[in-house]
Amino acid sequence: MSESPTAGSSSAPPKAMLMMVGSALCFCVMHALVAKVSQEVPPIEVAFFRNLFGFIVLLPAIIRSRFIAFRTTKLHLHAIRGGLNSVSMMMFFTALAITPLAEATALSYTAPLFMTIGAVLILHEKIHARRIAALLIGFLGALVVLRPGVVPLGLGPMLVIGSTVLWAGSMLDIKILARTDSSLTIATYMVVFLMPITLVAALFVWQWPTWEQLGFMFLLGACGSAGHMLFTEAFRHGDTTALMPLDFTKLIWASIIGFFFFGQVPDMWTWIGGTVIFASATYLSYREHQIARRTKIATQTAGSPASPETIAPELPRR
C-alpha cells in the first residue's frame, strides 16, 4: 500500500493524478446522464434512483463492516445533512436538465466560497485578508458567468447557485461529524436519509421508468460512486496542492461532452468566469488543507492522538 504524502509535500504520483482526472470525468459523465434522463424522467425522481443505486453499491461495504457503520452519537447532525443534501441534489439535477453542462460546472465551483463563509459564521473560524480577497475574486467570477443586467438570469443558473449554498452547508456538517464518525458511517447515513426524502418528493411527480431509463440511471449512479472512490483515493496518495488544479478538467470534460452529445458551445464568459471561480476555490481549499495540517501537527506534538479519519477537500459532487 502506497504511503501518504509527507507533511509539507506538494506533489502527487502519476497514479493519483490519473485518479483525479478520472474522477472529474466520472462526475461529468454522471451529470450528462442526469441531463439526458431528465428530459424524459422528472429530475427529482432521477435523484431518488441515484440514491437508491448508490445505496446498492455501498451495501457490500456496510455488510463487511458488520453494520458498525450505523453506530453514531450524532444522528441529528446526519439528519440535518440528509435534509440539506436532498434539497441540494434535487435542485442541481433540475438545473442540469435546463442548463448547459459547462455553465453548471463553472458555477458549481463556488461551493468552497460559500463553505468558507459558513465556517466563519457558524463554526466561528477566523478569516484573514487573503481569504477575504479570494472570496471576493471568486464571487466576481460568478458574476462574469451570470452577467446579471447583461443577460437575463435563468432559472437553471440560479438553481445551481442555490444548490451549491446548501451543499456547502452539508460539507460544514461533515466537518463536525468527521470528528467522531468514520467516513463509512457518514456515507451510509447520507444514503439512508436521502433515499426516503427524495422518494417522498418523487412520488408527487412519479412516472414509471422504462428498462432503458433504469439502465441509464444505474449507470449514472455507478459513475457517481466511481467518481467518489477515485476522488478519495487520489487524495490518499497525493497532495492537495498538486491535485486540486486537475479538478479544473471537469470544465473541459463538461464542454466536450456538452458539445458532442447536446450541441452546447460554452461562451467565452463561461470559461473566463469558471477559471476565476476555480482559482479562488482552489486557493481556499489549499488554505483549509494547510490549516488542518498545522492543527494535526500541533495535536501530535502535544501528545494527543490524531483522528484517523480525514476528509478530502470537497467540491459539489452529487
Image (cartoon, helix red, strand yellow):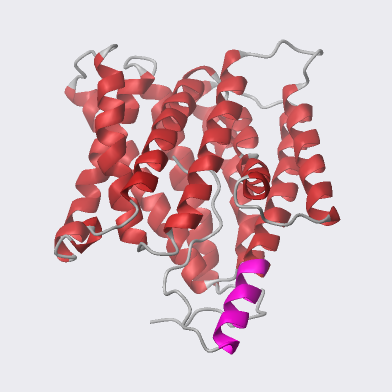
Q: Main secondary structure of the magenta part?
A: helix
Q: Is residue 131 shown above or below 98?
A: below
| Residue pictured at 60% horizontal, 46% vertical | 122
Asked if residue 296 is among those painted magenta in the image, a careful observer would answer: yes
**78 with respect to 196 (left or right):** right
Question: Which quadrant: the C terminus?
Answer: top left
148 and 197: which is toward the camera: 197
Q: Is residue 10 shown above or below 90?
A: below
Q: Which residues are magenta?
A: 291-302
**91 with respect to 116 (left or right):** left
Please state the horizontal and vertical placement of residue 204, each as a whole percent of the image. Answer: 28, 12
| Residue pictured at 59% horizontal, 36% vertical | 108
Q: Can residue 237 be seen in the rendering of this structure?
A: yes
Question: Which quadrant: the N terminus?
Answer: bottom left
**162 with respect to 201 (left or right):** right
Please state the horizontal and vertical placement of residue 136, each as a whole percent of the image. Answer: 81, 41
Q: Is residue 218 shown above or below 158?
A: below
Q: Can residue 11 be seen in the rendering of this structure?
A: no
275 and 158: which is toward the camera: 158
Asked if residue 299 is among those painted magenta in the image, a careful observer would answer: yes
Please state the horizontal and vertical placement of residue 305, each as a whole percent of the image. Answer: 46, 83
Q: Is residue 275 shown above or below 59?
A: above
Please state the horizontal and vertical placement of residue 222, each as a whole percent of the image. Answer: 31, 44
| Residue pictured at 42% horizontal, 56% vertical | 177
Residue 125 figure quarter: bottom right
